[in-house]
Amino acid sequence: METVPAVHLPVLESRRNRAKAIAQAGGLKAALESGALPARADVTLSEGLVLGLLKQGVRKYLVLFGHGSTDLGEVLRVYDEAGLTRTFNFRHETAMAHAATALKWAHGETAAVVTSIGPGALQALAGSLAAASNGVGVYHIYGDETTRGEGYNMQQIPKQEQDLFGRLTAVMGTSYVLHTPQALRDALRRGSLTVNHPYKAGPFYLLLPMNIQPEIVPGLNLAALPYPVKVPRTAIADLEALAEAVTLLKKYRRVVIKAGGGARNYPDKIRELAAATGAVVALSPGALGVLADEDPKNMHVGGSKGSLSGNYAMSQADLLLAVGSRAVCQADCSGLGYENTQAVINLNGDLADAFHYNRTVALTGDIGAVIDQLIAALKSAGPLAPDPVWLKECAGKKAEWLKLRAERAACPPLFDPAWGKEVLTQPAAIAVAADFARSVNALKFFDAGDVQANGFQMVADSRPFQTITETGASYMGFSVSALLAEALADQPRYAIAFAGDGSFMMNPQVLIDAVEHKTRGTIVIFDNRRMSAISGLQTAQYGFDFRTHDSVAVDYVTMASSVRGVLGLSGGSTRESLTAAFKEAYKHDSLSVVHVPVYYGPDPRGGMGAYGSWNVGNWVADVQARYNAQTL
């Protein structure tokens, strides 16, 4: 028999009745329309929030409860019992922030991250950088200090000011402090616009003061709570802008399309645009698969750590046709990626991104709709004449790049002094893992560092979303945490998380969370006993690496195997042994961890190399001088 304080029995009973009515009606909308649920109800703020999010289709909560979120937890308990929500408990706030980001990114499901006040909220906020940097909409709900000023609340920011957590979160994205429960409608409207924004989505932070959560909102109008925002597609109304773009495409003959993250949802349109303009395409790291790897027009990734062919196409083009790109340093070489470009046509929904470069014709709106308009305008204007020499040069650079990539993938094991034996190079090991992922149609999540940089150069995708590489923030620990999303999704996929040893250790508690939530997938740890991306950068700039490695050996197979349900495997030091490990991992019905030692050292075959400029370290003076000299 459930023991409930008598004062709370009426609240609990009415809450259960509401949840039952919604479940029996088949949803909140149906319950309101049928009259099974009255439009007005006396509910606590916590329950009103759950009802409001339910109306927006948010039914999954990733939680780490604390004293600042117990009331919301009690509401979710009841709604979980009714089958209306699903609540997943985690062991680290950053990991669950990443998992929620991956759930939206890979599956389109908007979830809510729930933490308490203080350190938990700060860790979730830190993890939300990945969502903010990659334009992924997620609700973040944090406990907050009480509103009555009775004295310090434990874990609040110890300062005599109001709304400090609200101000912190407002720096990262859109934030709302629910100081007044009756403001719930406005908060949810702003939240829906943020997480469902068509081209600039991001995390929405909802701060719930601890004393406000259980407060009754009398007569809350459930029918007035907002539905999810659905923004209509927009096209170009200014035909003069389209005409200007056509004029540029007829004038210039060495055209490169830069497909950014915003192009991921329009692969067929990008392929049509490349055919219509005669342009070649350079991808941003996060746009893998927008063109198939084997497509002759695909010059592969371009940017600070881009490919030989992608960077060549960018640097030699006289016209840039940017599509859905925000021109971060990794995408345009700290502003030096287009040193011979004379003009820009920029397709983007965001004005600031659309006008990032000088001499730009901005075509703002829905990328798919605008591409259709541009192609139609080109057909009316007559044929274009791309430079055949340009196309031949690009084809030659692509062949050169594919030859290099194949050589690095086939590199034999090299002797590594840290391991005291011959081990696989990271490109070779990544190639084996990517080939296996392709054979079983696995989703690939890539972590930060050298694994990420070598990874987006090695994989050979044919469509977007076969690989998700978190290049927006390069957040260590993202991939292993993202793997948990496959346990939460309505239609999960088998996934492989590609992580370095340092990235894995950022969130190793996912081993436990994965078993708890029945994740089926594999973590592959590429272990070079150091932060090789930074070691390599230090050596390239100054000739020495410093404090980017340690002498502590870790038995990751034993560590993984210590968690009941996790299968720990050694990938060995050959392609054959690594492939065998992946096959064994795939048979396991829970989480597997494959550990593979990889080479670090001066042999250039140990990595894919970097072919762009970057405004860091002792390269700064040269990069900035070159940037100041150009006028784009």
Image (cartoon, helix red, strand yellow):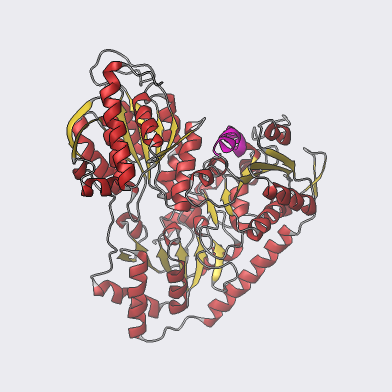
**Picture coordinates of residue 478, whole percent (x, y):** 53, 42
The image shows residue 249, relative to residue 530, as above or below, that is below
Q: Single out the residue that lies furthest toward the right.
A: 421
Circle count: 0
Quarter of the view holding residue 379: bottom left
Residue 319 visible in the picture: no
State the quadrant of the N terminus.
Answer: top left
Quarter of the view holding residue 142: top left
State the quadrant of the C terminus.
Answer: bottom left
Magenta segment's dominant SS is helix
Residue at horizontal 48%, vertical 47%?
489
242 drawn magenta: no
**Picture coordinates of residue 207, whole percent (x, y):** 31, 31
510 drawn magenta: yes
User: With 147 as the anchor, is 358 left or right in this view?
Assistant: right
User: With 205 as the anchor, is 539 left or right in this view?
Assistant: right
Q: Single out the residue that lies furthest toward the bottom.
A: 382
Residue at horizontal 51%, vertical 61%?
464
Question: What range of the chain is rendered magenta?
Answer: 503-517
Residue at horizontal 26%, vertical 24%?
10
The image shows residue 193, relative to residue 508, as above or below, that is below
Q: Nearer the viewer, residue 593 or 242?
A: 593
**Picture coordinates of residue 103, whole percent (x, y):** 46, 47
User: With 522 as the anchor, is 126 left or right in this view?
Assistant: left
Q: Single out the residue that lies furthest toward the top.
A: 151
Q: Nearer the viewer, residue 168 or 208?
A: 208
**Picture coordinates of residue 540, whole percent (x, y):** 64, 46
Residue 424 visible in the picture: yes
